[in-house]
């Protein structure tokens, strides 16, 4: 399996490049809602520059929450930084193997990702994004929305950092902060203020899933 690398965000592809003919014309379903999910530290334990699929550990209740969200009609997409690629700590083939294992384990558990989008760029020396796809920039979300016909206004960004939250708001999504970044509370500018907070994945699906309408009073 190969990862297609470009100057912009990356997309996971499971078809060898040499076997790919002209890309088919896509007709994505209009106005579909989605949940964008941070990867390291949000979906799986954060092990910097990990290349071993055996070390992948999903956060407690994450898989069950994704199943529930999918059943409610949300498309599921992973949006992640992998600056180890730019820094030379992780090779393309190592990352492709790791990402393939993550998606395979989700499929085995009954969860299918619509897409995985990756920013491979290192940040600028001052820590700010040096590209349009590194969060808090919204490039990964906007790119996915255009490709798949996602209604960003009806979508959510779930992450464990305030950069995730800002990226979601810049893209037009609602946002949910999972656990972390409590120490950054004084920095909660409007773009970095989450619409919801949850301590763990067990509460995420219930918070995002629309509540059924109450019957009119008789």
Image: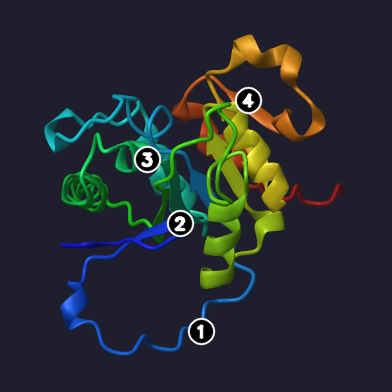
The image's mark for residue 82 is 3
Give the residue number, with chain letter if any, for mark 1.
27
Q: Are marks 2 and 1 in contact (CB under 8 Å)?
A: no
Could you say whether the residue bearing mark 2 is in a helix, strand or loop? loop
**Eyeballing the image, is 59 above or below 23?**
above
In primary-sequence order, the first of circles 4 and 2 is: 2
Compute the Cα span from label 4 to label 3: 25 Å
Q: Residue 200 in the image: x percent, y percent?
A: 47, 23
- Residue 29 image point, x, y percent: 55, 76
Note whether residue 209 is visible: no
The residue located at (60%, 59%) in the rendering is: 142
In the rendered structure, are the residues bearing label 3 and label 1 in contact, judged by CB atoms less than 8 Å apart?
A: no
Q: Are the residues at dot 4 and dot 3 in contact (C-beta closer than 8 Å)? A: no
Task: Say few, some or many: other residues with alpha carbon within 10 Å of mark 3 (under 14 / 14 to 19 / 20 or more).
Answer: many
Q: Which is in the foreground here, disc 4 or disc 1?
A: 1
Q: Residue furthest right?
A: 218
Pair 2/1: label in front: 2
Answer with mark 4 or mark 1, whichever residue precedes in sequence. 1
Residue 25 falls in which quadrant of the image? Answer: bottom left
Q: Earlier in the sequence, mark 2 or mark 1?
A: 2
């Amino acid at each position: 399996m190969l990862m297609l690398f470009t100057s912009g965000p990356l997309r996971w592809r499971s078809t060898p490049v040499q076997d790919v003919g002209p890309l088919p014309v896509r007709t994505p379903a209009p106005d579909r809602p989605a949940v964008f999910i941070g990867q390291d530290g949000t979906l799986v334990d954060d092990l910097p520059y990990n290349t071993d699929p055996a070390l992948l550990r999903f956060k407690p209740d994450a898989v069950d929450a994704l199943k529930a969200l999918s059943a409610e009609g949300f498309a599921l997409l992973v949006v992640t930084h992998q600056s180890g690629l730019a820094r030379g700590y992780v090779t393309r083939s190592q990352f492709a193997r790791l990402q393939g294992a993550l998606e395979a384990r989700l499929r085995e558990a009954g969860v299918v990702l619509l897409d995985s989008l990756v920013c491979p760029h290192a940040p600028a020396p001052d820590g700010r994004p040096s590209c349009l796809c590194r969060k808090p920039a919204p490039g990964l979300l906007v790119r996915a929305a255009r490709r798949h016909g996602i209604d960003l206004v009806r979508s959510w960004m779930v992450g464990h950092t305030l950069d995730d939250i800002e990226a979601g708001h810049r893209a037009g999504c609602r946002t949910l902060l999972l656990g972390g970044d409590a120490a950054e509370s004084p920095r909660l500018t409007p773009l970095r203020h989450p619409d919801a907070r949850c301590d763990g994945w067990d509460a995420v699906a219930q918070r995002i899933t629309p509540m059924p309408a109450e019957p009119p009073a008789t």
